[in-house]
Amino acid sequence: MTTYGGTAQLALSVDLPYPADIAVTCRQLQREVGERVAQLTGLDVRDVTLTIRRLATAGGPDRVR
């Protein structure tokens, strides 16, 4: 998190479930994280940047096909 003059910019790395609507999931995550950080800190969250590390299947890495 970077702060300046009462505002914050957040950068997160996340794993997302697969299959999922990536665009919708990212927008929702950005909104929810931004709102929660603002509530907890009192800062105006201007930007939440996401890096998607991987798409994780529901069965995890040991899933049998």
Image (spheres, rainbow, N blue to C red):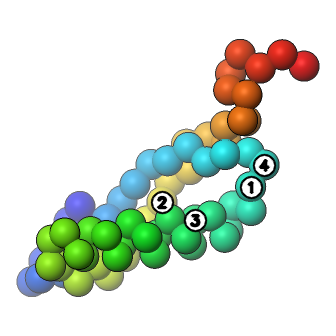
Mark 3, mark 2: which one is toward the viewer? 3
Question: What numbered label is drawn on residue 20?
Answer: 1
Where residue 22 appears, x then y in whole percent?
69, 61
Which mark is first along the chain, 2 or 4?
4
Which mark is first along the chain, 3 or 4?
4
Q: Which residue is mark 3?
A: 26
Q: Which residue is mark 4?
A: 19
Where residue 23 sits, quadrant-wise, is bottom right
| Residue type of the residue flagged with mark 2 | Leu
Around disc 3, counting alpha carbons within 10 Å, would you say few (fewer than 14), some (14 to 19), or many (20 or more)? Answer: some
Which mark is first along the chain, 3 or 1?
1
Where residue 57 sits, quadrant-wise, is top right
Compared with 52, 21 (above or below) is below
Compared with 7, 52 (above or below) is above
Q: CA distance from mark 3 to mark 2?
A: 7 Å
Where residue 42 appears, x then y in whole percent?
15, 79
Where residue 56 sits, quadrant-wise, is top right
Tag 1's secondary structure?
A: loop
Looking at the image, which is closer to me, 54 or 41?
41
| Residue type of the residue flagged with mark 3 | Cys
Q: CA distance from mark 1 to mark 3?
A: 10 Å
Q: Residue at position x 11%, y 82% from top?
A: 6
Q: Which residue is mark 2?
A: 50
Q: CA distance from mark 4 to mark 2?
A: 18 Å
Callouts 4 and 1 close, C-beta under 8 Å: yes
